[in-house]
Amino acid sequence: MIFPVRCFSCGKPIGHLWFKYKELIEKGKTPKEALDELKVERVCCRQIFLGHVDLIEEVSKFKKW
């Protein structure tokens, strides 16, 4: 749902790269090219970017007040 601030396995901070990654993907780069440009080299960190599904907007519709 919400992109993690740190990698679950190694603890490297990656949260600040999420919006830059999304911009690169929207510009037409492949995920590999985008992650290489952002210098995300570890497999554990790359899998978080590749496996993340951004559902926060859909979940927020069901919030009770």
Image (cartoon, grey):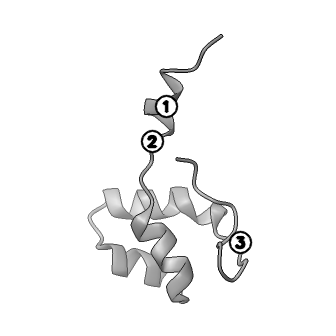
Compared to 22, does 47 lie above or below? below
Q: Position of residue 13 (x, y in %)?
A: 71, 72
Q: Residue at x 63, y 59 (%)?
A: 4
Q: How far apart, in angstroms, are the residues tagged by discs 3 and 2?
A: 21 Å
Q: Residue 55 bears which disc, if any?
A: 2
State which tag comes first along the sequence, 3 or 2: 3
The C terminus - image quarter: top right
Which quarter of the picture shows residue 33? bottom left
- Say what amino acid the circle numbered 3 marks: Pro
Which quarter of the picture shows residue 16? bottom right
Q: Are marks 1 and 3 in contact (CB under 8 Å)?
A: no
**Residue identified by numbered label 3:** 13
Compared to 24, does 34 lie above or below? below
Q: Position of residue 18 (x, y in %)?
A: 54, 60
Q: Are marks 2 and 1 in contact (CB under 8 Å)?
A: yes
- Say what amino acid the circle numbered 2 marks: Leu
Q: Position of residue 12 (x, y in %)?
A: 71, 78
Compared to 64, does 18 lie above or below? below
Q: In the rendered image, is residue 49 in sight?
A: yes
**Residue identified by numbered label 1:** 59
Which of the pair 8/25 is nearer the observer?
A: 8
- Mark 3: secondary structure: loop
Q: In the rendered image, is residue 38 in sight?
A: no
Which of the pair 42/25 is nearer the observer?
A: 42
